[in-house]
Amino acid sequence: VVDTTIIHAKDLDFHLEYERDVSHPIICQVGGNDRDLLYQATRTVLEYGYDEVNLNMDCPSNRVAGKRQFGAVLMKNVDVAESAVQAMFDASLAHAEETLQRTLESAI
């Protein structure tokens, strides 16, 4: 799912909702190259209950790698790829810390 779709979609459930009783892990692959958008998109995906979020770095489609400048083209721009992965890591860490805090608060 493209980062801007996750952030701006009017019906986000259409893009991210899944049957909760399906076997896990449930993984969402996000496409994008903007650090801030990927951070926001990762947080949203994790709030939907996905077990993992990964970055699309292998799609060679001209629509993806050409016009949008993500997918396989990220392998040519290490700085952008590194920034994207770091943003997603930071978002995942922040989500985990908040989840742990809520769990601890409810246990007290």
Image (cartoon, rainbow, N blue to C red):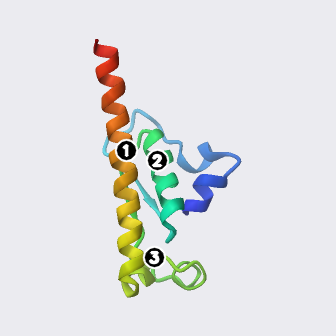
| Point 50% across, 46% down: residue | 44
Image position, residue 102 (x, y; %)? 36, 25
* Residue under label 2: 43
Judging by the rendered image, the residue that carries numbered circle 1 is: 94
Mark sitting on residue 71: 3
Task: Out of 107 and 15, give the one closest to the viewer.
Answer: 107
Q: Is residue 42 visible?
A: yes
**What's under tag 1, amino acid-wise?**
Ala
Left or right: where 1 falls relative to 80 = right
Q: Residue at x 40, y 44 (%)?
A: 50
What's the mark number on residue 86?
Answer: none
- Residue type beneath disc 2: Arg
Is residue 40 positioned above or below 62 on the image?
A: above
Callout 3–callout 2 Cβ contact below 8 Å: no
| Residue at the top extreme, as displayed | 108
Amino acid type at image mark 3: Gly
- Secondary structure beneath label 2: helix
Disc 3 crowd rating (10 Å Cα; few below 14, some 14-19, many 20+) is many
Which residue is pictured at 36% across the width and 65% down the height? 85
| Residue 28 location (% of width, % of height) | 43, 54
Instruction: Say which label, 2 or 1, has the lower sequence index.
Output: 2
Dot 1: what SS? helix
Q: Of tags 1 and 3, which is closer to the observer? A: 1
